[in-house]
Image (tube, grey):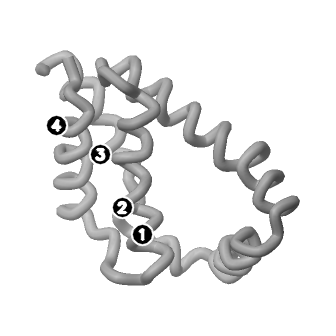
């Protein structure tokens, strides 16, 4: 597991601790698109093809390089709770939570 943990330091370092997604000027637009894709199947398809799938693939590739047994599932483990916090505005994205979440993801991803 040591090899995988070392390769994850870039996730912790790059995590958006200082500025939450809600502070970004594009946040209202992203929320509007998120709401619209619930009822607009064509927009949902475009969102998946243009934004979601390439981003998930990039995250999965990084997880695979870190030794994740199932990188696609690990990408969902990593990003699902982030989307949940953002979408429901349930809690902040502080540094401690991000560190703990990355650690949880590593354990759940069964990093070699």
Q: Is residue 94 above or below residue 22?
A: above
At a point 21% along the width and 39% down the height, the residue shown is 108
Q: CA distance from mark 4 to mark 2?
A: 15 Å
Q: CA distance from mark 3 to mark 1?
A: 19 Å
At a point 51% along the width and 71% down the height, the residue shown is 21
Q: Secondary structure at mark 3?
A: helix
Q: Earlier in the sequence, mark 2 or mark 3?
A: 3
- Residue in front for this viewpoint, 70 or 25: 70
Name the spot of residue 98 as percent of width and height, x first. Answer: 27, 57
Q: Which mark is residue 107?
A: 4
At a point 76% along the width and 74% down the height, the residue shown is 39
Q: CA distance from mark 2 to mark 3?
A: 16 Å
Q: Residues within 10 Å of mark 2 (few under 14, many from 20)?
A: few
For mark 1, what is the residue? 84
Horizontal arrangement in the rendering, residue 20 relative to residue 27 (left or right): left
Q: Which mark is residue 12?
A: 3
For mark 2, what is the residue? 81
Marks 2 and 1 close (CB-CB < 8 Å): yes
Q: Earlier in the sequence, mark 3 or mark 1?
A: 3
- Residue in front for this viewpoint, 103 or 108: 108
């Amino acid at each position: 597991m040591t090899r995988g943990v070392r390769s994850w330091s870039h996730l912790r370092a790059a995590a958006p601790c200082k500025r939450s997604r809600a502070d970004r000027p594009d946040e209202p637009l992203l929320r509007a698109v998120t709401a619209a894709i619930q009822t607009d199947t064509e927009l949902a398809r475009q969102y998946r093809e243009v934004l979601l799938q390439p981003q998930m693939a990039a995250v999965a590739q990084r997880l695979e390089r870190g030794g994740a047994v199932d990188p696609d599932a690990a990408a969902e483990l990593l990003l699902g709770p982030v989307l949940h916090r953002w979408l429901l505005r349930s809690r902040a994205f502080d540094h401690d939570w991000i560190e703990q979440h990355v650690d949880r993801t590593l354990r759940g991803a069964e990093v070699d």
